[in-house]
Image: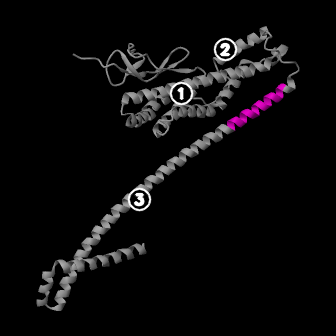
Amino acid sequence: MSTTRLLDFVAALGFVLIGCIVYTHINTKDCLEFKSISLLERAVIWIANAVIFGIVLLVSYKTLSDVWNQHRYQEENNELKTKIERYQEENNELKTKIERYQEENNELKTEIERLQEQIKGNDEPTPTKNEEESEERKEFRKDLNNALRNLRPAGVPDIEIPRPHKLKEEFADLHEKEWTSALKSLQKTTKSEDMSIRMLLQTLRDIYSSCCNYSNDEKEEAMQSLLMRITGDNVAKKKLNEQQMMAEVCKQQNRSTARAIEEIRESVFDKNPELVIDHLWKKYVERSVKICRLMSIQSKPMLLDFGPEQNADLNPSIFTTYKATGSKVNFVVWPAMFMQENRELLSKGIVEPIERNIH
């Protein structure tokens, strides 16, 4: 602070000196008239005018200096905010990777324990692929298929998967926030709202399809894992009850959720390298993947209806209109959400109809 004041004082003296010099050259006539008055009066008038001129220069200098400093501080503050946001994103990515590695480690431990138990209890050779399934094995497969349709019966521990109506709220919030922000951002590049909407819908369609396929593969893998434990004549001895089967499948899907989200998200990024640079589009993808993954592993799966084709009739009981009015579909803006089992509508979709001509 003392250094700053010293510099201001030196600057003030400098400006006063400049004022004296400028005043002498500009007001030469006044300087000649000073000869008719006393030396003291001349000195007082000369110094007073020079000081006033110097103060004006000093105030102007200070004002410009403050404006420049404020602009510089604002730029530095913005840079710091950007760095903090980037570090937070990197921190979140590291946390996700750590969780995934922990889950993989737990899966490996579980698999090792299972193999050890299988080695201890396996007294008979594994049947060949050409062997016909026993009646008990067929019955077990039927029970397992029935069980997989209802992954969370009574007695299975809660695996912290949101209920359908909670996911419905999350899906609506996704459209209101991340979708809207991503749309505005994409429009700056595409210069077309229609094209930006279609791009976002296709992204969501790809994510939803990937999540459903991933979940189905997990269920099939779980079924094969369970069937491996009931080979040969010891079917009845090793046959698991329905509750144990459900717990097995639920645990497997729950353990792999973080990994599934990361793999699907990275797959979407790889498919759209030109969009990855858009920070708001990435946020839209990340939340969409999480919601679609949780939808696909519900005990009663949920589905998205991406709507009718262009020129099809608009069904107002399932879809609302976006901006235009009409009875024919132009393109889908946002999918409708259903319960898969009974097609119960959870939330309406949005379509942009073909503009109705008014004569």
Please name which of the two marks, 3 or 2, marks the residue nearer to the observer. Answer: 3
Which one is earlier in the sequence, the residue at label 1 or at label 2?
A: 2
Image side of residue 125 versus residue 281, left or right: right
Image coordinates for residue 357, horizontal then vertical, percent: 26, 17
Q: Position of residue 35 (x, y in %)?
A: 13, 89
Residue position marked by numbered label 2 in the rendering? 146
- Mark closest to the chain's N terminus, 3 or 2: 3
Image location (x, y in percent) of residue 301: 57, 20
Q: Distance between the Cα atoms at labels 3 and 2?
A: 65 Å
Q: Secondary structure at mark 3?
A: helix
Number of other residues with Cα within 10 Å of mark 3, as a class: few under 14, some 14 to 19, many 20 or more: few
Give the alpha-carbon distance from disc 1 to disc 2, as whole Å. Answer: 27 Å
Residue 240 appears in the picture as rendered? no
Residue type, mark 2 in image:
Asn
Q: Amino acid at mark 1?
A: Ile
**How many marks are shown on the rendered structure?**
3
Q: Examine the rendered structure and indicate whether residue 56 appears above or below residue 216.
A: below
Dot 1 or dot 3, earlier in sequence: 3
- The residue tagged 3 is 73
Q: Which residue is mark 1?
A: 207
- Left or right of residue 353: residue 164: right
Residue 129: which quarter of the image? top right
**Front: mark 1 or 2:** 1
Q: Is residue 8 above or below residue 138?
A: below
User: Regarding mark 1 in the picture, which secondary structure is present there?
Assistant: helix
Question: Residue 304 at what x, y percent from top left?
Answer: 50, 21
Image quarter in which the N terminus is found: bottom left
Q: Nearer the viewer, residue 263 or 243?
A: 263
Dots 1, 3 in contact, CB < 8 A: no
User: Which three-letter amino acid code belongs to the residue tagged 3?
Assistant: Tyr
